[in-house]
Image (cartoon, helix red, strand yellow):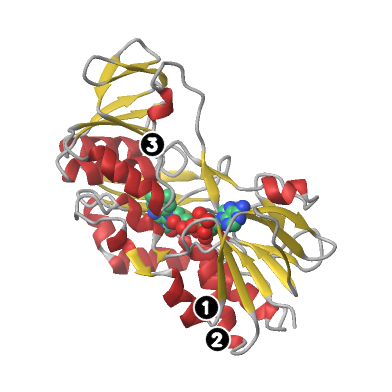
């Protein structure tokens, strides 16, 4: 009997494997991973430094424990090509595996903008345990860190490393923080809170070059300023890993395109997690991938099930000024109403029929779970039945 093959052992691959195993106790299962196969919670990567956590501390179970728990074979190796017709995957080194079905849970790559300067290759980005380990080594014994990107991951790292005692310069070209998640007034409140936490903000300018200086890296900004840094961390976004699927002829746009059943454009092939574009939506967060994993496990166990997304607010882990946001899609008709007091923000977005379509809770408002739950209930589903 051919196994179910899952390529990827991130949260998407392992959550699917666990959900499937609940429904298919004895079926053969193979997981393939280009990393070590340890199970860990990726959101912990941007909150671990202040707590003094090493990469090993973040591991919840290693690949041997996971293989045992899932009654699965876990293969460490990189998949280099796919054969959609035969439901085959080929690994570096020549091994070819054939599955009953094949699931792609390949994640996303950090976007690396082209930078000038003789030290541009020294930029870190953190998207897995190996990256975290390398960044932690680079941070040992130094003080000044420049973070490029004021989105969710950049703000979280800035806050965490500042709490851990580093001097932080946070550079965001868009001119305000969390530009794709927050309305402008809330961005400014968050900026004030991060400044009060001791983070230096450089908004509305990008990094043009990074050069070696006598003792530190010289980070040149587009408006002429130069920052000194021991370490530069880039957090300017992620790109779904689509190259493998694209080369094999599976339809891709921003991500590997799948329908509500997580089916790719060829039978027997599925995708979920950060690599997948589900009905046009690329949502690189934990809650969507869990909803996908539950639905896909049912389908793979024989009961074809469409994924449903309720409203899924995003939590930004900046503890001195926590943020919960249910973002509003660009160009949505409607308007924001704000209640702002210092860093405490409650903002609601309604359409012309007074239907709540999004909200922001920041500071003390974000620490009231009942408020969040009440608002969340009023939001429409993101993908309804
Ligand atoms: C620092 C950080 C903080 C975050 N915080 C939050 C948060 O607070 N809340 C939230 O909801 N989301 C958060 N996210 C996003 C969330 O963690 C991701 O959406 C989720 O972990 C993605 O899981 P995944 O399994 O799709 O991808 P990944 O975890 O990237 O896993 C991809 C897997 O595919 C494997 N792979 C890739 N290519 C190949 C190949 N060719 N051959 C074999 N194997 C391959 C990799 O080795 C890996 O095992 C955060 C992300 C980061 C980076």
Residue 351 visible from this viewpoint: yes
Crowd band around label 1 with a 10 angstrom C-alpha radius: few (<14), some (14–19), many (20+): some
User: Mark 3 or mark 2: which comes first in sequence?
Assistant: 2
Q: Quadrant of the C terminus?
A: bottom right
Q: Secondary structure at mark 1?
A: helix
Horizontal and vertical percent position of residue 129: 39, 54
CA gap between label 3 and label 2 equals 39 Å
Residue 339 is situated, as x and y percent measured from the top left of the image, at 29, 47
Element on which disc 2 rests: helix
Q: Tell whether 277 sits left or right of 312.
A: right
Whether residue 341 is visible:
no
Which residue is tagged 1? Answer: 18
Assign a secondary structure to mark 3.
loop
Which of the pair 76/197 is nearer the observer? 76
Residue that numbered label 2 is attached to: 22
Residue at the disc numbered 3: 124
């Amino acid at each position: 009997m051919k196994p179910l093959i899952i390529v990827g052992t991130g949260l998407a691959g392992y959550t699917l494997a666990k959900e499937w195993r609940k429904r298919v106790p004895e079926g053969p299962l193979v997981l393939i991973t280009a990393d070590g196969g340890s199970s860990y919670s990726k959101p912990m990567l941007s909150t671990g430094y202040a707590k003094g956590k090493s990469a090993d501390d973040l591991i919840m179970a290693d690949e041997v424990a996971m293989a045992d728990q899932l009654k699965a074979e876990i293969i460490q190796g990189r998949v280099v090509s796919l054969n959609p017709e035969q439901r085959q995957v080929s690994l570096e080194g020549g091994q070819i595996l054939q599955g009953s079905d094949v699931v792609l849970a390949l994640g996303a790559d950090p976007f690396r903008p082209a930078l000038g300067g003789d030290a541009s290759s020294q930029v870190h980005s953190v998207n897995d345990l190996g990256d975290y380990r390398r960044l932690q080594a680079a941070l040992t014994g130094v003080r000044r860190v420049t973070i490029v990107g004021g989105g969710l991951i950049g703000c979280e790292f800035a806050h965490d490393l500042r709490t851990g005692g580093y001097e932080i310069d946070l550079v965001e070209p868009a001119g305000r923080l969390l530009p794709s998640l927050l309305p402008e007034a809330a961005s400014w409140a968050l900026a004030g809170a991060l400044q009060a936490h001791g983070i230096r903000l450089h908004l509305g300018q990008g990094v043009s070059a990074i050069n070696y200086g006598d003792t530190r890296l010289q980070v040149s900004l587009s408006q002429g300023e130069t920052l000194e840094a021991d370490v530069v961390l880039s957090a300017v976004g992620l790109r779904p890993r689509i190259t493998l699927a694209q080369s094999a002829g599976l339809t891709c746009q921003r991500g590997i395109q799948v329908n509500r059943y997580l089916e790719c454009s060829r039978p027997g092939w599925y995708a979920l997690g950060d690599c997948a574009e589900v009905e046009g939506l690329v949502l690189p967060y934990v809650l969507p991938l869990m909803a996908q994993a539950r639905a896909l496990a049912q389908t793979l166990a024989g009961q074809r099930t469409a994924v449903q997304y309720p409203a899924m607010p995003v939590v930004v882990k900046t503890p001195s000024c926590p943020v919960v946001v249910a973002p509003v899609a660009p160009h949505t008709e409607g308007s924001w109403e704000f209640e702002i007091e210092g860093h405490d923000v409650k903002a609601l977005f309604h359409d012309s029929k007074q239907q709540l379509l999004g909200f922001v809770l920041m500071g003390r408002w974000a620490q009231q779970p009942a408020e969040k739950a009440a608002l969340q209930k009023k939001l429409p589903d993101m993908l309804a039945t």
